[in-house]
Amino acid sequence: MAVHITSRADAEAIIREQVISTIFQDAPKQSTFLSMARKLPNMTSNQTRMRVLDFLPTAYWVDGDTGMKQTTRQAWDNVFIEAAELAVIVPIPEAVLDDAEFDIFGEITPRVNEAIGQRVDSAIIFGVNRPRNWQNDIITLARQAGNNVAVGSSPDYYNLLLGEGGVISKVEDDGYMATGALAAMSMRAKLRGIRATDGSLIFKSDMQGSTNYALDGAPMYFPQNGAYDNTIAQLIVGDFKQAVYSIRQDVTVKILDQGVIQDPTTKEIVYNLAQQDMVALRIVFRMGWALPNPATRMDEDRVGCPFAYLEPSTAVTTQKVTFTVKDNETSPVAIAGAIVDVNGSRIKTNESGVAEFNLRAGTYPAKIKKTGYGTITETVTVEAAAVAKTVTLIKQ
């Protein structure tokens, strides 16, 4: 005789399903750069000009009571902060908003703020999707100053970080003290085993500092907003207060119920908000940043950089860009000591009038100047091969 039961499958339609009334998610992460750099007053237009010390005066000993006193000069330069805009639109049908158990806009807004922080860090630190009107990123600036340290096939991380020629010494050689360090989470495993010559751990918990860990006294940060790119740098050290930023428009949220949404590429209208009963959350943020790099007694030509980085095992591909600077005489002569500024990266020409850069693919503005000559501006496009440019300065 068959025995029958009412199984779970039979009663599935009337069994109450428990749903946890919490969305499990990590806390939104903020921009690491904005928390470490120096904030200037908000911008009042899309461009802010800073006066930066460009040339230092010199003092001379006088020979005897009637010796002739020599003259000197001091000069200033302009550094500009250009505002760039980050924005996004999130269209949502009104019916979805009405039916949702949670405040959808309240859930989306902090995640968009997190995405803004990620984009800011990626652009300023690594140059990823860098706005065209911004100066070179921190990695590119450090590389042109010679502040990149290769790891080699059998890396000794103690010397690479703390030894002579290591990343911290690179910063100090240019006249700065490291105020912070950044690294990917994967770098922690390498750091934990590094010991000083006396056997003490150099990567250790710093319960009294601003972060849990410190490296030679500099607080260490391990960004978790997805911006850190360990294929470009394993670790970055620097004086982050030398970098400045200014906000033109703080994060602004606006809810739209009129208008259309177009495809950015084809310009085709994808949604009509009013016709399709939709609303859109529009979030806008505008800011700019700069590394003023003023002249100091340890770096009078402003060719140094307050940052240095440890390269990955396979360094990022760059192309050599060579500037040869000559005068406008009938038989041109090389000009030594000219300053070649490629989008914020400065190198002084050698005795042959040559300045060499190592740049990733992209288009860069360049300015070449020397006292007594007119300033020349150029545009350099770097692709998959070395670039050579000859520049003629006209004597004034």
Image (cartoon, helix red, strand yellow):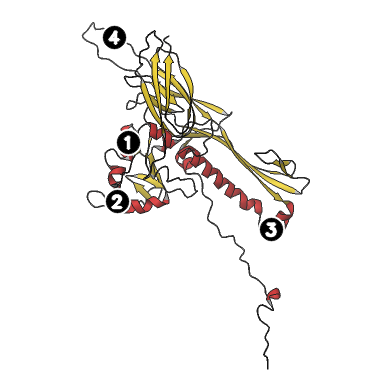
> Are circles 4 and 2 on residues that touch, CB within 8 Å?
no
x 49%, y 45%: residue: 227
- Cα distance between the residues tagged 4 and 2: 55 Å
Q: Which residue is mark 2?
A: 194
Q: Which residue is mark 1?
A: 170
x 32%, y 17%: residue: 58
Left/right of residue 209 with respect to residue 103 in the rendered view:
left
- Cα distance between the residues tagged 3 and 2: 51 Å
Left/right of residue 396 with respect to residue 104 in the rendered view:
left
Q: Quadrant of the N terminus?
A: bottom right
Q: Which residue is mark 4?
A: 69
> Are circles 2 and 1 on residues that touch, CB within 8 Å?
no
User: In the drawing, what numbered circle is on residue 143?
Assistant: none
Residue 159 locus on image (x, y percent) = 27, 44
- What crowding class fits label 2: few (fewer than 14 Cα within 10 Å), some (14-19), or many (20 or more)? some
Q: Which residue is mark 3?
A: 100
Mark 1 or mark 3: which comes first in sequence?
A: 3
Mark 3 or mark 2: which comes first in sequence?
A: 3
Q: Amino acid at mark 3?
A: Ala
